[in-house]
Amino acid sequence: MMFLFRRSQPRVSVDQAHDRTSGNTPDAVLLDVREKPEWNAGHAPGAVPVPLSKLVAGAVLPAEATGRPLVVICRSGHRSQQAAKLLTERGQKAVDVKGGMNAWAAAGHPVLDERGNHGQVA
């Protein structure tokens, strides 16, 4: 009997995502694939916003995310899984953050609004 296995997208914890994307020498870019109103309400410091809807439509990554490993985040982890898979298929090195911004905030990592004040995950 032959079994078919679907290759799953690599995932990291919010703590691993924080460690890889913050500090003086981050080794990856945190790519937030939520829509603009969600990002404006609350995002991780330094996150680069590129909504999944734009990625699906063929958007090019901004310069700060081009050619660097990507740690992809959304609100709960579903859209980021899709985005990481899409980006990997396009030749990018991308991992998904388990639990998304909900888990990020629950772990006590900073969340900022569009003005740089304390934000809320939306």
Image: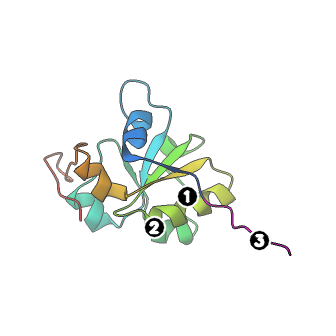
Q: CA distance from mark 2 to mark 1?
A: 9 Å
- In depth, the one of 34 and 63 nearer the eye is 34
Q: Answer with left or right where residue 62 lies relative to residue 67.
A: left
Q: Secondary structure at mark 2?
A: helix
Return the residue at label 3. 4
Cα distance, mark 1 to mark 3? Answer: 21 Å
Position of residue 80 measured from the top left corner of the image (x, y, whole percent): 47, 61
Labelled pair 2, 1 in contact (Cβ < 8 Å): no
- The kind of secondary structure the magenta stretch mainly shows is loop
Q: Earlier in the sequence, mark 2 or mark 1?
A: 2
Within 10 Å of disc 3 (Cα), the crowding (few <14, some 14-19, many 20+) is few
Image x and y of residue 71, in percent:
48, 47
Picture residue at 37% right of the left edge, 58% below the top: 99
Q: Are marks 2 and 3 in contact (CB under 8 Å)?
A: no
Amino acid marked by disc 3:
Leu
The residue at which mark 2 appears reads as 79
Q: Which residue is mark 1?
A: 84
Is 21 a magenta residue?
A: no
- Residue range in magenta is 1-8
In reply to whether residue 4 is colored magenta, the answer given is: yes
